Image (tube, rainbow, N blue to C red):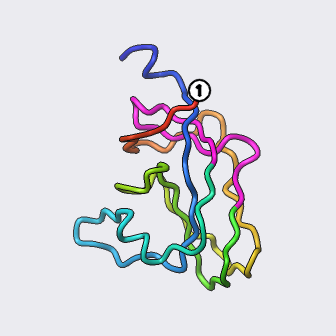
Amino acid sequence: MTHAEDSPEIIECEIRLHSSRPAIRADGELSWSDWSESAVGRAVTFQAIAMTAKGAWGGPLSPGVQISPSVALDDPYWTVFLPASRGVPIVVGQVGRPLAVGEAFTLHAGEPGAWTTDVVFDGAIITE
């Protein structure tokens, strides 16, 4: 493994809110086409830290990223995709509470040394 593979990079990502989680597919892989059916509002672009060659995502840069729904959501989920909105999400989560119109959900900045592994970064835009 080369030193470049161990070096974190800054990449562009997009976070979206969803009104629900799509039904689990037989292969377990939910793609953008599955998630797009429940997407609410516009994506928010942000910068995150990653090691694309190792398939590791470290989360948003400080102070994190906020997104607000354009409609009230009872049981919202969020996804992070690369800007091309294709393939499978980098990470997915449940907000854990209802969101009112305009109420912000914050995906907090990544913790130093904490990595989400086995992420596919095909087409990642590296900004640094």
Q: Is residue 22 above or below residue 72?
A: above
Name the side, left or right, on which 85 lies relative to 99.
left
Residue shown at the point (36%, 71%) measured from the top left: 34
What is the span of residues highlighted in magenta in the rendered image? 46-66
Residue beneath the point at 36% across and 78% down = 23
Image spot of residue 83 (x, y percent): 49, 50
Who is closer to the viewer here, 29 or 103?
103
Residue 61: quadrant of the picture:
top right
Please give the name of the residue rendered at 59% of the width and 76% of the height, measured from the top-left corner. Answer: 76
Q: Pointer 1: what residue?
A: 128
Question: In terms of image quadrants, where is residue 120?
Answer: top left
Residue at far left of view: 26
Which secondary structure type mostly characterizes the magenta part of the structure? Answer: strand
Is the N terminus in the top left, top right, bottom left or bottom right quadrant? top left
Residue 21 pos. (x, y %): 46, 75
Report x, y in % for residue 82: 47, 49
Numbered disc 1: secondary structure: loop
Q: Looking at the picture, tell me which residue is in the foreground, 79 or 114.
A: 79
Q: Position of residue 99 (x, y in %)?
A: 70, 78
Q: Is residue 24 left or right of residue 36?
A: left
Residue 104 relative to residue 7: left or right: right
Q: In this picture, is 4 found above or below 31?
A: above
- Determine which quarter of the picture holds residue 68: bottom right
**Residue 18 is inside the magenta segment:** no
Above or below — where is 51 with respect to 102? above
How many neighbours does mark 1 have within 10 angstroms: few (below 14), some (14-19), or many (20 or more)? Answer: few
Vertical order, 39 against 124 (above or below)? below
**Amino acid carrying mark 1 in the image:** Glu
Kindly identify the residue that appears in the image at 56 percent across and 42 percent down: 12
Quadrant of the rendering where the C terminus is positioned: top right
